[in-house]
Amino acid sequence: MIRSTALVLALSLTGCHLVLDPGDYTDENTDGGADATSTDGGDSTRMIRVSVESGADDALQDPGGVMNIAYAWISLYSDDHWGAVRFRIPDITRGATIERAYLELLIDSDAEDDPDVVVYIEPTPNPLPLTTSPYDISERARSAASVMWIDTGIGAGIVQSPSLISLVQEAVDHASWTAGSYILFIFDARQLSGIFEFWQHENGNGASPAELVIRYTPN
């Protein structure tokens, strides 16, 4: 599922907390095309929003390497849990400049809202779908770049990750990158204190899967 956006709205499921990000106002292209993008103020900057499309595009790896594909949550409770989410990226060609990039995830409990994870990508433009093979997340290659996501009490509802510009830029600079390639994010849990859990695609039959928002300038 892909849609263009004029601004980012994060409406919490508890407390009706509304977040408006003024950096993401755009002139929206609403031609109804599946791969619609939007331009910002008449310049060449564009924005796309993409969602996890199927159950094989996100997964939890439990201790002992057990893979949970058809599961409701990515539950990062301890340092031997891993998570992954995978997105197809239309339109963005190799060498584009990434101006903004972040994930939007749905957390359904304020008792599980303490992220303490390292986020990587798998450094290939064609990461395979996730499978039930043991250790299918932790044994994948990981990017040179990484992003620490450490926070406490971020609340239930739709939350934004820290900036993932370095990861997305590494992906689109890959020698084999083309429009329509994939990015697979890997969550390596540290969880020195607290726990972190967000919805997988299967929760709500794909009603609120993880989403990736990218603002970029074509090359």
Image: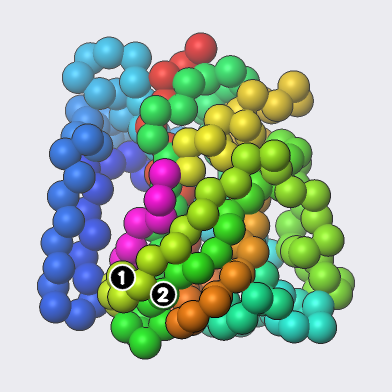
Q: Is residue 179 magenta?
A: no
Q: Residue furthest front?
A: 192
Foreground residue, 189 or 210? 189
Residue 61 horizontal side relative to residue 33, left or right: right
Between 69 and 83, which is closer to the camera in this rendering? 83
Measuring from the top left, give residue 167's x and y in whole percent: 57, 39
Residue 41 image-quadrant placement: top left
Q: Estimate the spatial distance between the alpha carbons at disc 2 and disc 1, rounded to whole Å.
A: 7 Å
In the depicted structure, whether residue 105 falls above or below residue 183:
below
**Foreground of the two, 170 or 158:** 170
Q: Please tell me which residue is depicted at 82% across the width and 70% down the height of the picture.
A: 135
Q: Residue 148: in sight, yes or no? A: yes
Q: Is residue 120 above or below residue 219?
A: below
Neighbor class of circle 1 (other Cα within 10 Å; few <14, some 14-19, many 20+) is some
Give coordinates of residue 151: x percent, y percent.
Answer: 38, 66
**Identity, as a three-letter code, of the amino acid under mark 1:** Ile
Which residue was labeled with disc 1? 154
Q: Secondary structure at mark 1?
A: loop
Residue 37 placement: quadrant = top left
- Name the residue that disc number 2 marks: 114
The residue under label 2 is which amino acid type? Asp
Q: Residue at x 37, y 87 (%)?
A: 111
Vertical placement of residue 43 versus 129, above or below: above
Start-end of magenta stretch: 158-163
Q: Please tell me in which quadrant of the rendered image residue 25 appears.
A: top left
Tally of numbered discs: 2
Marks 2,1: beta carbons within 8 A: yes
Task: Tell me which label, 2 or 1, sits earlier in the chain.
Answer: 2
**Residue 130 in the image: x percent, y percent?**
74, 63
